[in-house]
Image: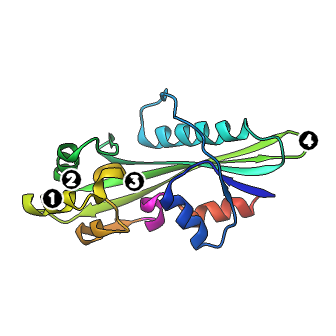
Amino acid sequence: MKLILASESPRRKELLKQIGMEFEVMSCGGEAPVTVTLPYQIVEEHAMQKAKAVAGKIMEPAIIIGADTVVALKDCILEKPKNKAEAKEMLQKLQGNTHEVYTGVVIIKRYEDGTQKQVKFHECTKVTFYKMSAQEIEDYVNTGEPMDKAGSYGIQGIGAKYVKEIVGDYNNVVGLPVARLYQELKEK
């Protein structure tokens, strides 16, 4: 059955390739406002929106994967920064602290008869940052790496040097808990 990733995230694509998955990418369009407030609920709702948007565009049997990732500090969501000042502000909050990274995943399996089966889950990984000086934050932001990442850092890039500890799935922090996803796909 065809596997479709309802995301154009380069990190999610790379993670699926890393575990040997063959898949297509289909854009899902924009996200609608959410009706929930807790981080795990938000990522699950966004993942559902993405998966349903793609499922609505196809007629053939397929497995559609929608995913969404957020960084949360004390249940406050840290989105992708809009500018360098916002990136610096986020990193200032994260440095020396522990935060959570949530990824919600929705799998929609569309059968030949048009029926669908859905699975929804989320993963949470705790990430602790070392203390960072104002100069380190400035230098890191100037690399440009933080600008397209939730929470203003990339654990798979330069940002790795500021990560003291993680508890949970590393790949979840990158953007997709591929081991859990693989296990869920095996169940189908």
The residue indicated by pointer 1 is: 137
The residue indicated by pointer 4 is: 113
Query: In the rendering, which numbered label is found on residue 186?
Result: none
**Residue type at tag 3:** Val
Q: Which residue is pictured at 25% across the width and 72% down the height? A: 161
Find the distance from the CA under tag 4 to the CA under tag 1. Answer: 54 Å
Find the distance from the CA under tag 3 to the CA under tag 4. Answer: 37 Å
**Residue type at tag 4:** Asp
Q: Is residue 5 left or right of residue 12?
A: right
Find the distance from the CA under tag 4 to the CA under tag 2. Answer: 49 Å
**Hey, which residue is sitting farthest left in the picture?**
134
Query: In the rendering, which numbered label is found on residue 91?
Result: 2
Residue 33 part of the magenta-drawn span: no
Which range is magenta? 168-176
**Which quadrant would the N terminus be assigned to in this image?**
bottom right
**Residue type at tag 2:** Leu
Q: Give the mark nearer the N terminus: 3 vs 1.
A: 3
Find the distance from the CA under tag 3 to the CA under tag 2. Answer: 14 Å
Find the distance from the CA under tag 3 to the CA under tag 1. Answer: 20 Å
Within 10 Å of the Cα at label 2, are there few (<14), some (14-19), or many (20+) other Cα atoms?
many
**Residue type at tag 1:** Ile
Query: Do tag 4 and tag 2 residues touch (Cβ < 8 Å)?
Result: no
